Image: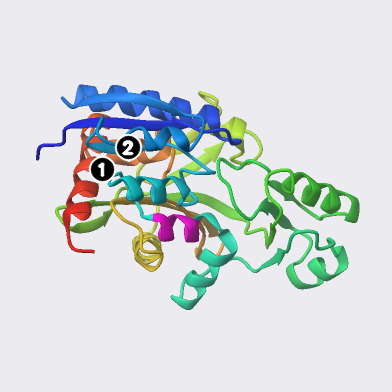
Amino acid sequence: MSVGKVAVLCGGDGAEREVSLNSGAAVCAALRSAGLEAETIDLQSLDGANALAGRFDVAFVAMHGDWGEDGTLQAVLEEIGLPYTGSGPSACALAMHKGRSLERFVRAGLTVPRGMLLAPGEPADFRSVVGSLGEDLVVKPCSGGSTVGVTILRSASEGDFGGAVEYARRYGPEVLVESYVAGRELTAAVLERGGTAAVLPVVEIVPRRGFYDYANKYTEGATDYRVPAPLEPEVLRRVEAAALAAHRVLGCRAYSRADFRLSEEGVPFILEVNTAPGMTGTSLVPKAAGAAGLSFPELVRAIVEASLDQWSAPR
């Protein structure tokens, strides 16, 4: 397939800017290794996206969080007629809002943690939350990624809960509070090739200390990864089926990554779907692809080609 010149869009002005810049640099280098002409574009305003028309043939979206995963950038690219990688505006916006995406998962029959959504300005009623969800809680911004603004509380106190809600609200007005699922951390990437969506080898995430927070995600050596994850066949089947179902329910395109907690009873709880997952040297999708025999350059080229296939198909 003739791809043409690729603009690797990264940066932005959100909490995940540095991660996005790292993803952009890695993707650009991989695309060049795959024989494609590519250039990184540090978008610090959406106005910069309008200037891409006529200069590039396709955009690789390596922006995380605001713009890149909430559908804003995708809408701009559609307006100027520039093909881009990954999901469209509606799927991105739906996946970005954890409350709305979890509702879709429940309707599709997927298992999710029990949770409550705190609206902007809504007081954090500790007794009500603990009465519904228990004392082991996860408090997170309703939108966002890279575990920014997330707190895990075990045997939560009222003071700690209030502080966790305040911390989450630094990164967004809505807060999602969920029951903590004790067990294992898993992630499953979906990649479309030749019109067929398949799950790459499931990754188990084992931080050496604490939970899989921002530092453990992006510090070399802070986390161990088991690829493929050592899972019983039936558990693996359920995780793969849930990842594919979530990809389809949200209307994702080309690729996505679903995150799970595997309970001590062996039940996979889906937490969220990432439509523009990380592509740094420590990122999960490249690890999964590597276990499937795909090098990083082969992976990013496959994402570009799958996206262009869907862009040219009737929509």
Q: Is residue 93 inside the magenta stretch?
A: yes
Image coordinates for residue 197, horizontal then vertical, percent = 24, 58
Query: What residue is shown at x 9% (from left), y 40% (from top)?
Result: 1
Q: Is residue 56 visible?
A: yes
Q: Which residue is mark 2?
A: 60
Judging depth in this view, the residue of 174 and 186 nearest the camera is 174
Image coordinates for residue 109, horizontal then vertical, percent = 45, 76
The amino acid marked with disc number 2 is: Phe
Under circle 2, the secondary element is strand
Quadrant housing residue 58? top left
Quadrant housing residue 82? top left
- Quarter of the figure with the C terminus: bottom left
Magenta residues (range): 89-95
Q: Is residue 130 above or below residue 79?
A: below
Q: Are marks 2 and 1 in contact (CB under 8 Å)?
A: yes
Judging depth in this view, the residue of 184 and 149 nearest the camera is 149
Circle on res. 303: 1
Judging depth in this view, the residue of 217 and 93 nearest the camera is 93
Query: What residue is shown at x 20% (from left), y 47% (from top)?
Result: 308
The amino acid marked with disc number 1 is: Ile
Left or right of residue 79: residue 31: left
Q: Is residue 138 inside the magenta stretch?
A: no
Under circle 1, the secondary element is helix
Left or right of residue 55: residue 277: right
